[in-house]
């Protein structure tokens, strides 16, 4: 009795590739949605459920540059983490380490902002 392991390895690789493709497509739609904010924020809904334009909500050119820089940086981090994750066991370890470091940094920044705001 012989077992054929080649087919099962092909299936698992195919599943990982489809998951990677799916996460990349979700990321593309997610960041396109974030970029759409650039044009949709000045529009608001009144109490009568009518859409109106509020020029006070329009971003200034400096805010647009900062917003674009933020979106590009977060998109590069997202796509690099997604694609490194599927490189193998070492890629998964690197992604988990990066996520833990990001979580620690976020907690540190939250505490620093809280300390600055209360003083």
Image (cartoon, grey):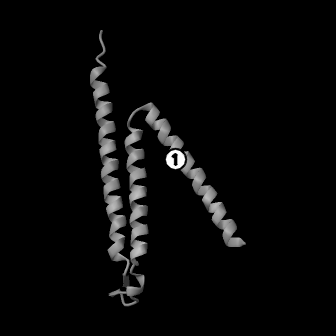
Left or right, residue 62 beside residue 8: right
Eyeballing the image, is 101 above or below 108? above
Farthest residue, direction top: 1
Residue 12 in which image quadrant = top left
The residue shown at (61%, 60%) is 109
Q: Residue 19: percent from the left, percent from the top?
A: 33, 43
Q: Quadrant of the N terminus?
A: top left
Question: Disc count in the image?
Answer: 1
- Residue 50's spot in the image, x, y percent? 33, 88
As displayed, is residue 38 above or below residue 43?
A: above
Q: Quadrant of residue 20?
A: top left
Residue 60: x and y in percent read 40, 78
Quarter holding residue 61: bottom left
Is 117 rendered above or below residue 96? Answer: below
Q: What residue is at 35 percent from the left and 59 percent from the top? A: 30
Secondary element at image label 1: helix
Which residue in the rendered view is the most extreme toward the bottom?
Answer: 48
The percent coordinates of residue 97 (x first, y second) are: 53, 41
- Residue positioned 56% across, 51% down in the render: 103
> At 45% across and 31% down in the image, what residue appears?
89
Nearest the eye: 101 or 89: 101
Dot 1 alpha-carbon crowd within 10 angstroms: few under 14, some 14 to 19, many 20 or more: few
Please identify the quadrant where the C terminus is shown: bottom right
User: Residue at label 1?
Assistant: 99
């Amino acid at each position: 009795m012989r077992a054929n392991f080649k087919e099962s390895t092909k299936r698992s690789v195919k599943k990982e590739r489809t998951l990677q493709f799916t996460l990349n497509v979700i990321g593309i739609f997610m960041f396109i949605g974030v970029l759409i904010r650039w044009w949709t924020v000045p529009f608001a809904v009144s109490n009568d459920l009518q859409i109106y334009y509020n020029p006070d909500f329009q971003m200034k050119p400096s805010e647009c540059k900062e917003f674009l820089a933020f979106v590009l940086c977060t998109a590069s981090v997202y796509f690099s983490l997604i694609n490194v994750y599927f490189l193998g066991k070492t890629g998964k370890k690197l992604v988990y380490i990066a996520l833990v470091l990001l979580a620690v940094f976020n907690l540190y920044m939250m505490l620093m902002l809280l300390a600055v705001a209360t003083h």
